[in-house]
Image (spheres, rainbow, N blue to C red):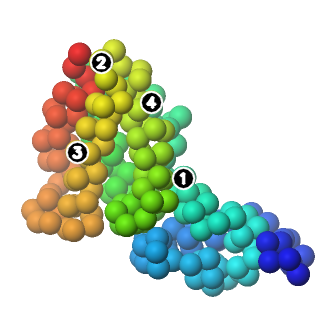
């Protein structure tokens, strides 16, 4: 049988198998990081043949991108962040960012991205694409400020630094701080990056 094609039985498993693969991939990447995760390991965790993983997603890079893509839905996020008074933009962005990280369902793929981006270019590309291009740059492009891309990157660096210390390194007292306290401290800085001309 061609390695890239699933068996008839596997193909009949349809979307349920695809969903299991994505869930297994998110868990494997988050727990093991990009380098130590394999297609075979994902397949085993999902209870499917490795050929089915290749059939749905292709390479490991493509599985990784698909596994984390659902975390960010810019079409839903951007109107929420941009809606409301301009002076509240920093607070809305900080609140959204922390709400995504505080939710265990979305935290898992984000941990996979953050842990892996430091050591693997494919993960770094996913981080750039989803966090910067698909979210922050789109938000910044809607604002009437100079250098929106640069400002988006400054905002991202601030928020990703918080994520690294709070959720990966678990540095105290940040790791156990109330999210609202973090929002209150961070919002003015994000506002300055994205809201001031």
Please tell me the numbered disc located at residue 146: 2
How packed mark 1 is, by other alpha carbons closer than 10 Å (few <14, some 14-19, many 20 or more), is some
Circle 3 residue: 158
Residue bearing the label numbered 1 = 69
Of label 2 and label 4, which has the lower sequence position? Answer: 4
Mark 3 touches mark 2? (CB < 8 Å) = no
- The answer for how far apart the CA atoms under marks 4 and 1 are is 16 Å
Crowdedness near tag 3: few (<14), some (14–19) or many (≥20) residues, C-alpha within 10 Å: some
Crowd class of label 2 (few under 14; some 14 to 19; many from 20; radius 10 Å): few
| Total numbered circles | 4
From the image, state whether disc 2 or disc 4 is nearer to you: 2
CA–CA distance in space, label 2 to label 1: 29 Å
Q: How far apart are marks 2 and 4 (CA)?
A: 14 Å
Q: Where is residue 41 in the image (x, y as percent from the top left)?
A: 58, 82
Can residue 75 be seen here? The reply is yes
User: Which mark is in front, 2 or 1?
Assistant: 2
Can residue 113 be seen at all in this image of the molecule? Answer: no
């Amino acid at each position: 049988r061609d390695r890239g094609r699933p068996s008839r039985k596997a193909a009949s498993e349809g979307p349920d198998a695809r969903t299991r693969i994505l869930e297994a991939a998110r868990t494997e990447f988050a727990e093991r990081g990009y380098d130590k995760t394999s297609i075979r390991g994902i397949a085993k965790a999902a209870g499917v043949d490795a050929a089915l993983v290749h059939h749905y997603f292709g390479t490991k890079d493509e599985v990784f991108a698909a596994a984390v893509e659902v975390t960010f839905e810019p079409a839903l996020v951007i109107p929420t962040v941009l809606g409301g008074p301009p002076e509240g933009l920093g607070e809305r962005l900080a609140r959204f960012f922390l709400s995504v990280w505080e939710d265990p369902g979305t935290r898992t793929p984000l941990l996979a991205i953050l842990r892996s981006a430091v050591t693997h270019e494919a993960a770094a590309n996913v981080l750039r694409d989803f966090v910067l291009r698909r979210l922050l740059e789109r938000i910044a492009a809607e604002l009437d400020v100079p250098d929106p891309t640069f400002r988006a990157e400054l905002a991202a660096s601030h928020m990703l630094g918080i994520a690294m210390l709070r959720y990966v390194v678990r540095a105290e007292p940040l790791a156990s701080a109330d999210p609202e306290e973090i929002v209150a401290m961070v919002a003015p800085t994000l506002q300055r990056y994205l809201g001031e001309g």
